[in-house]
Amino acid sequence: MLHRGPDEQNGFRFSNVDLYHLRLSILDMGGGKQPMTLHNRYTLVFNGEIYNHRDLRKQFNLTAATNSDTETLLLLFQKIGENCLQYLDGMFAFAIYDADEKKLFLARDRAGKKPLYFFKDEEKIVFASELNCLKQLLPLKLNINHFYHYLRFGSFYKKATPYFNVNELTAGSLLYIDCNNLETTEKKWWNIHDSFLHENKDSFEEALIKTEELLHTSVKRRIESSDLEVGTFLSGGIDSGLITAIASNYVEKLRTVTVSFEGEYNEAPLAKLVANKYNTQHTEINISYKNLRDDTEQIICNYGEPFFDSSAIPSFYVSREAKKNITVVLTGDGADELFGGYRRYIPFAKHDFFKKNKSLQFFANMFQSMLPAPNDKKTAYNQMYRFLSLAKKSGIESYLSAGMDIFEEYENNFLSENKFYLKEVTEDFNKINNSSLSGLGKIMNLDFDIFLFNDVLVKMDIATMHNSLEARSPFLSKELLEYIPSIHDEYKIHGGSTKYILRNLAKKYLPKEIIHQPKRGFEVPLKNWVNNELKDLVYDYVGASDAFGKTIIKPEFINRLLQKKIKMPAEKRAKMLWTIFCMEVWYKKVYLT
């Protein structure tokens, strides 16, 4: 894992406990060495940043020998134990060993920005920031049931991984390990569901003012908690535009990085408007996919598990180029899940599609069966077609259809026809579905717990850290995570407008050309990749006689999919093939090596 910490590597050994740390030096270069030990009792290995650590020193009267947030965390844990987590604004995964009690305490931040995987059997417990590390250390065996999660979600569900005995510590969770007998106790220390349930009475004007104040506080903290220059990823959207605009208040000459991809929609002109308005040190990087065929397999392997999201490819390229200019970058991650940025939220703001409605399901099914499949995902026709797919379902099936929509309506082609693999998923879904939340609140709660955690943050962590670049997300601050879920639905989705409160805030900071731009992100020409640039590669992996996918999906279905003999939207076919392809690359290049 040298790419995660190229600046310094150290270890600690006491009795039957070994701790190792690889450091990317950003704050207190000399005083932040790890593992860090306090009073010969507590030893900490820590991945991430505590942005409010200076405030915490004042609040709890902590006397430190260094300027490091690592020491702040140790001192605070010594003083109030696990309760320290409630006060931390940051991204973190850490382990603290208590030599007196012979116990390890592991914890992860609210959103799960920083990763933490652990292996447990009768003889040992091993934990690390990446699955590839565990794979190198241990003889791991596949858990086939979890691959059905992957095929439906595009990633492994919450704590699940491809392996037996390996779990991911989920967002907002902590884990105690008794080092004498290896007994473990795991629990949630924070859950965004509680914030969604909180009924906030703020008017729109009050919410707008508070959102602006909290965003300023968050950006300021993330800039000040670095001894290195902090820049921003600047696209043509409102999320990164707002972060850049606010950051320019706290950095005299902010460095901004914009990328464009050959042959794709170019947001660079819109980004340039923001850069000019705030007089930033602006760099435009044009990236080509000319090495796509050579790079794709390695980028997929970086994730240590099958990972469907094709925007991982451009994210890697962007991070690699950005590292040439900066080491710490602010991003807009989390804004869509918190403020309502996805188009699929609009129907849920009007109707709770998770509740059964037999009449709606009947008519939606009837109308969709009469319509031809769409070929272009960007058309209004495709939106209507997907809406009908959503309306004819209920419960967990509705969520899967509204979200990734990979194998939906084709899951009967799995070799395991029993949906027992959805047991935990369904139980978690039912807890939220049976709560008092609105339809919009439910899908946003689910997306935070599943899509943000298992996809968005994983994608960015691996893409940036593989290039020794640290990405910080102001929208995921402690205060915003506690406040924004509680504000009124109409402040998020207003009529047909997404992220309504952020768009109104943007009127104060951004050029008018940007305010009503639709969400794009890194748009990937997946259909073209599968049918053209990467066709031979995809077909060689997916169509191989010894393909792993043919042990969990009916081989005849895969063959017909490759041969275009199944009537379905072209984009959906591309997503299915890409999902299987990523799994095959991982299986051959990671698991079998």
Image: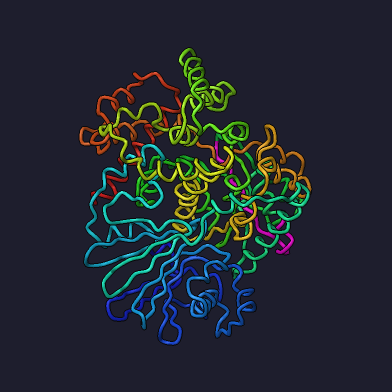
List x then y, in percent, for residue 235.
Answer: 63, 46
User: Relative to residue 330, is residue 415 depicted above or below?
Assistant: above
List x then y, in percent, for residue 454.
Answer: 44, 48
The answer to whether residue 338 is left or right of residue 245 is left
Q: Is residue 253 magenta?
A: yes
List x then y, in percent, for residue 507.
Answer: 77, 45
Count of marks, rendered view: 0
User: Relative to residue 119, is residue 374 depicted above or below?
Assistant: above
Residue plotted at (59% across, 49% down): 196
The answer to whether residue 344 is left or right of residue 533 is right
Q: Is residue 206 magenta?
A: no
Quarter of the figure with residue 4: bottom left
Residue plotted at (59% across, 69% down): 226
Q: Which residue in the rendered view is the most extreme toward the bottom?
A: 39
Q: Is residue 30 visible?
A: no
Tell me which segment is drawn in magenta: 246-262
The answer to whether residue 214 is left or right of residue 151 is right
